[in-house]
Image (tube, rainbow, N blue to C red):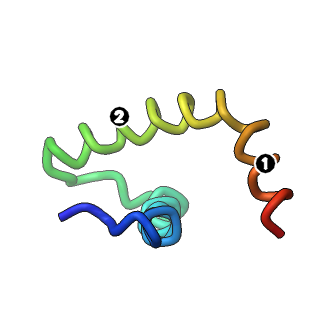
Amino acid sequence: MGNMSYCRFKNTSMDLQDCFEAIENNELNDLVDYEYDGIETILYLCEEILEYRARLEEAINNNK
């Protein structure tokens, strides 16, 4: 089930924080194949999202 639109960014950021902590703690061995696929997707999406960085920062600043 996907995130509700009113909390998708908050929920996703918390999940991404959990992934980041796993990376920091070097918990990358012994994952199942689909987890490595997930890492690959995260890397791709991070690069894509960064292309919108200026727009995202503007939205943040306009809504503070």
Q: Answer with the quarter of the image where residue 37 lies.
A: top left
Residue 8 location (% of width, % of height): 43, 64
Q: What residue lies at 46% left-to-right and 70% top-to-bottom?
A: 6
Determine the CA span between mark 1 and mark 2: 25 Å
Residue at the disc numbered 1? 57
In the rendered structure, are the residues bearing label 1 and label 2 in contact, judged by CB atoms less than 8 Å apart?
A: no
Q: Quadrant of the N terminus?
A: bottom left
Q: Is residue 42 above or below residue 60?
A: above
Q: Nearer the viewer, mark 1 or mark 2?
A: 1
Q: Amino acid at mark 1?
A: Glu
Marker disc for residue 40: 2
Q: Is residue 54 left or right of residue 45?
A: right
* First-in-chain label (1 vs 2): 2
Q: Answer with the quarter of the image where residue 49 lies.
A: top right
Q: Is residue 63 above or below residue 35?
A: below
Residue 16 location (% of width, % of height): 47, 61
Closer to the camera in the image, 47 or 4:
4
Marker disc for residue 18: none
Q: Is residue 30 left or right of residue 39?
A: left
Q: Kindly state the secondary structure of the residue where label 1 is placed.
A: helix
Q: Kindly state the secondary structure of the residue where label 2 is placed.
A: helix
Q: Is residue 29 above or below residue 55?
A: below
Q: What residue lies at 85% left-to-right and 58% top-to-bottom?
A: 61
Closer to the camera in the image, 10 or 58:
58
Q: Amino acid at mark 2?
A: Glu
Closer to the camera in the image, 32 or 18:
18
Residue 12 location (% of width, % of height): 44, 63
